[in-house]
Image (cartoon, helix red, strand yellow):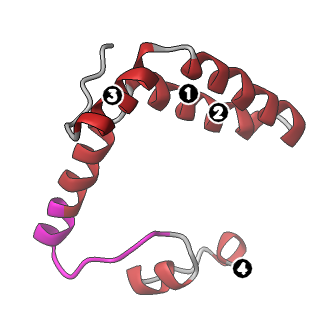
Amino acid sequence: ELAYTGRLVTGREAAQLGLVLRCFESREEMAAHVEQVAGLIASKSPLTLRGVKQALLYSRDHGLRDSLQQVKLWNGAVLQSRDLAEAFEAALQRRPPVFRE
């Protein structure tokens, strides 16, 4: 319907339709949330983040079977990486992980 009519929707309606994850009452509230999410993403393994991005981009242009194979390949790479060991060590030591680029 929206694609054919071009009808504008409010932020709340977009959330109800599942087009956005959430709405904010103010720019300040939104900016605080964006900063929090950005910090959380930045704390993750760069290798894992690259893999997630690659998998999403790959799945856009390929079928389910091929996309799952791509995820399998990336998971294999991550399982052999220093990042995984660092994540486990950090969890055991109750400290934030420090990942290398």
Q: Reading the chain from its start, which is encountered first: label 1 or label 3?
A: 1
- Residue at x 21%, y 67% (from the top left corner): 30
- The answer to whether residue 38 is left or right of residue 13 is left
Q: Reading the chain from its start, which is encountered first: label 4 or label 1?
A: 4
Separation of disc 3 and disc 2 at Cα?
26 Å
Q: Which residues are magenta?
A: 20-32
Q: Residues within 10 Å of mark 1 (few under 14, many from 20)?
A: some
Question: Which residue is identified by label 2?
Answer: 55
Separation of disc 1 and disc 3 at Cα?
21 Å
Question: Which residue is identified by label 4?
Answer: 1
Question: Which residue is identified by label 3?
Answer: 89
Q: Reading the chain from its start, which is encountered first: label 4 or label 3?
A: 4
For the residues carrying marks 4 and 3, which lies nearer the camera in this image?
3
Q: Secondary structure at mark 2?
A: helix
Mark 4: amino acid: Glu
Q: Quadrant of the C terminus?
A: top left
Mark 1: amino acid: Gly
Residue 90 locus on image (x, y percent): 28, 32
Mark 2: amino acid: Ala
Residue 23 locus on image (x, y percent): 33, 77
